[in-house]
Amino acid sequence: MNPKYNDSDVSTELQVVSQIIFGEPASKANSRRVAHYGGMSRLIKSAKALSYSDVFRQQCKTLPALMTGDLRITLHIYYASRRPDLDESLILDLLQGYVYANDRQVKERHCYWGLDPENPRAEITVEKIDEVAPKKKPRQANRTGQSST
C-alpha cells in the first residue's frame, strides 16, 4: 500500500458499548416525593428510583475512559407489567460517570418499550456519532489584516 494515498485514521477511542442492567427502572417523571428538611419542602427521588439507582450502580461497568463527543443511545426497556410509562431519563442520568461525562452528549435516542414479567431489564447500547453541529471555523484574516467574508 502506498502511504501517500492512505488517508485512513485509527481511533483509540471506544466507539460502541453495550450493557444489560437487570431490574425495572423507575420513571423519573413519576419518581419524586415530597420530603421536609429544616422546615422546607423538597422533591426527592422516590424509594423505587433510589432502589433502582443502587441496583444500576452495582451492575453498570465503568469504562476505563469515558466516551467523548456526540453519542447515540438505543434502549430496549423491558418492564414487569404494562403499567409503567416508557421513560429513559433516569437511565441517562445514571450512565453519567460510567459511560459518558454528561447526558448532554446524547444527541440521538431510540427507546423501545417491552414486557417481560420474569426478567425486567434495560438493554443499553451507546455509540459515538459524527459531531451533530460542528463548531464554526474562525474567519481567516487576509494580508491586510481584515477578515474575509
Image: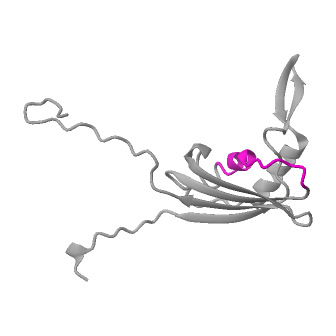
Q: Is residue 34 above or below residue 103?
A: above
Query: Could you say which quadrant of the image residue 47 lies in?
Result: top right
Query: Could you say which quadrant of the image residue 103 lies in?
Result: top right
Instruction: Locate residue 37, reporting x and y percent.
Output: 87, 23
Q: Is residue 93 above or below residue 11?
A: above
Q: Is residue 12 magenta?
A: no
Instruction: Locate residue 11, reporting x and y percent.
Output: 43, 65
Q: Residue furthest left?
A: 144
Q: Residue at x 55, y 54 (%)?
A: 71
Position of the C terminus by quadrant: top left
Q: Residue at x 78, y 55 (%)?
A: 56
Position of the N terminus by quadrant: bottom left
Instruction: Locate residue 119, reporting x and y percent.
Output: 87, 66
Q: Is residue 93 above or below residue 127?
A: above
18 sits to left or right of 85: left
| In the foreground, 87 or 3 | 87
Q: Is residue 95 magenta?
A: yes
Q: Residue furthest bottom?
A: 1
Instruction: Locate residue 136, reporting x and y percent.
Output: 34, 40
Q: Residue at x 45, y 66 (%)?
A: 12
Q: Residue at x 18, y 32 (%)?
A: 147
108 sits to left or right of 58: left
Q: Is residue 147 above or below residue 130?
A: above
Over which residues does the magenta segment extend? Answer: 82-96
| In the foreground, 84 or 145 | 84
Query: Could you say which quadrant of the image residue 19 lies in?
Result: bottom right
